[in-house]
């Protein structure tokens, strides 16, 4: 797949989506989110990690583009949505990380109230990252929106939730991300937040239009039905994930103030790159499976 922008007839600017522009679309959108980080050395490491993982970006783009190339058999769709969910839904570990921050804050309430306040504020900004996922404010839980999308795209039943459909590399990715937030030092959990929120801003922004085209052209849905089924994707767009990235940056700044810890740029870079590589591995494994099925079918 070409990574150069393909201009569509009558469209003056390149359409930035994952099937038209591949890894380059992800790259550009992530830069857009990452540029909000004020901590310059860490921002440079984020950008360098992104630059160093272009092969992962291409694997991810190929993974989506291959899936959307034609109407996959139901079994394949189940595997896709079950595995994809493991790489994306992480609100529980966001809240777990916030809990760890408030526990640290409680220990400083009497001895150092200013630092305790900074830690509570770090946890507060972390809470804001998960508000939409958890339906705070009365919106539909994102878990429900994903369930609706995957179930409708898997022929109307929810067998896709069965763990037999989850690729082992997707389960490993989820376990790794959870461990970064729940067992590693809190700062490492924050690095994982930064890369995840910036990445999801790019991914969901660049898959929305291709998924809509696929739903309409390959699955035969009317446009309003395609939009309804794809609500899980669209609710993350229009600045939602970019705001989550900004909340993660603010949480980091408060946490540094409250904990007195220092950023380790090497550990941060390793976390960023591992995130991209693990996501790339999941999407590459899915790509292999589509081509295998394709060969069998032809
Ligand atoms: Fe969400
Ligand atoms: Fe988010």
Image: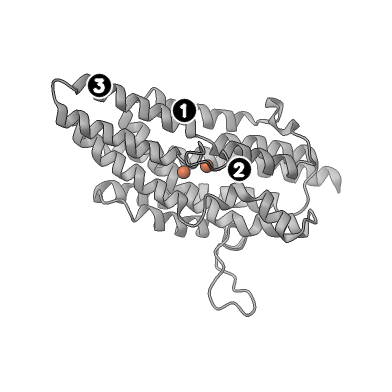
Give the residue displayed 49% in from the left and 40% down from the top.
277
Q: CB of mark 2 within 8 Å of CB of mark 3?
A: no
Q: Is residue 271 visible?
A: no
Reply above or below: 31 against 4. above
> How many other residues sit within 10 Å of disc 2, few (<14), some (14-19) or many (≥20)?
many
At horizontal 67% and vertical 52% (from top left) the residue drawn is 228
- Please tell me which residue lies in front, 52 or 260: 260
Q: Reading the chain from its start, which is encountered first: label 3 or label 1?
A: 3
Residues at marks 2 and 3, CA–CA distance in whole angstroms: 41 Å
Looking at the image, tell me whether mark 1 or mark 2 is earlier in sequence order. 1
State the image coordinates of residue 83 (x, y, percent, origin top left).
63, 35
Q: Which mark is residue 178?
A: 1
Q: Quadrant of the N terminus?
A: bottom right
Quarter of the rendering containing residue 285: top right
Q: Which mark is residue 283?
A: 2
Given residues 271 and 111, the one toward you in this image is 111
> Is residue 135 found left or right of 2 in the rendered image?
left
Left or right: where 283 falls relative to 72: left
Q: In the structure shown, which secondary structural element does the residue marked by tag 1 occupy? A: helix
The reply to whether callout 1 and callout 2 are in contact (CB within 8 Å) is no
Task: Quote the CA–CA distance across marks 3 and 1.
Answer: 23 Å
Where residue 278 appears, as percent x and y from the top left, is: 51, 37
What residue is disc 3 on? 106
Q: Quadrant of residue 87?
A: top right
Q: State the SS at label 2.
A: helix
Circle 3 packing at 10 Å, graded few (<14), some (14-19), many (20+), is some
Quarter residue 118 falls in: top left
Count how many numbered circles sit on residues in the image: 3
Front position among marks 1 and 2: 1
Using the numbered discs, state the Cα–Cα distance from disc 1 to disc 2 in whole angstroms: 19 Å
Left or right of 61? Residue 289 is right
Circle nearer the N terminus (2, 3): 3
């Amino acid at each position: 797949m070409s990574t150069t922008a393909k201009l569509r007839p009558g469209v003056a600017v390149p359409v930035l989506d994952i099937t038209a522009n591949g890894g380059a679309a992800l790259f550009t959108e992530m830069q857009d989110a990452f540029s909000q980080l004020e901590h310059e050395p860490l921002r440079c490491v984020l950008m360098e990690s992104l630059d160093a993982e272009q092969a992962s970006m291409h694997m991810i783009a190929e993974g989506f583009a291959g899936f959307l190339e034609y109407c996959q058999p139901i079994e394949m769709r189940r595997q896709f949505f079950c595995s994809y969910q493991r790489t994306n839904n992480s609100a529980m570990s966001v809240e777990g990380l916030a809990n760890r921050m408030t526990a640290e804050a409680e220990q400083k309430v009497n001895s150092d109230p200013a630092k305790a306040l900074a830690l509570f504020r770090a946890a507060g900004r972390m809470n804001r990252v998960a508000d939409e996922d958890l339906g705070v404010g009365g919106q539909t839980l994102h878990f429900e929106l994903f369930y609706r999308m995957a179930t409708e795209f898997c022929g109307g039943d929810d067998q896709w939730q069965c763990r037999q459909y989850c690729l082992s590399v997707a389960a490993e990715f989820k376990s790794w991300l959870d461990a970064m937030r729940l067992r590693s030092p809190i700062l490492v959990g924050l690095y994982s937040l930064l890369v995840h929120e910036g990445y999801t801003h790019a991914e969901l922004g660049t898959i929305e239009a291709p998924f809509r085209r696929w739903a309409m052209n390959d699955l035969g849905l009317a446009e309003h039905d395609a939009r309804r089924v794809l609500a899980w994707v669209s609710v993350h767009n229009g600045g939602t994930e970019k705001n989550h990235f900004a909340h993660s940056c603010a949480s980091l700044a408060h946490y540094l103030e409250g904990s007195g810890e220092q950023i380790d740029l090497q550990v941060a870079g390793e976390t960023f790159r591992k995130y991209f590589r693990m996501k790339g591995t999941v999407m590459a494994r899915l790509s292999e499976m589509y081509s295998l099925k394709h060969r069998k079918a032809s």
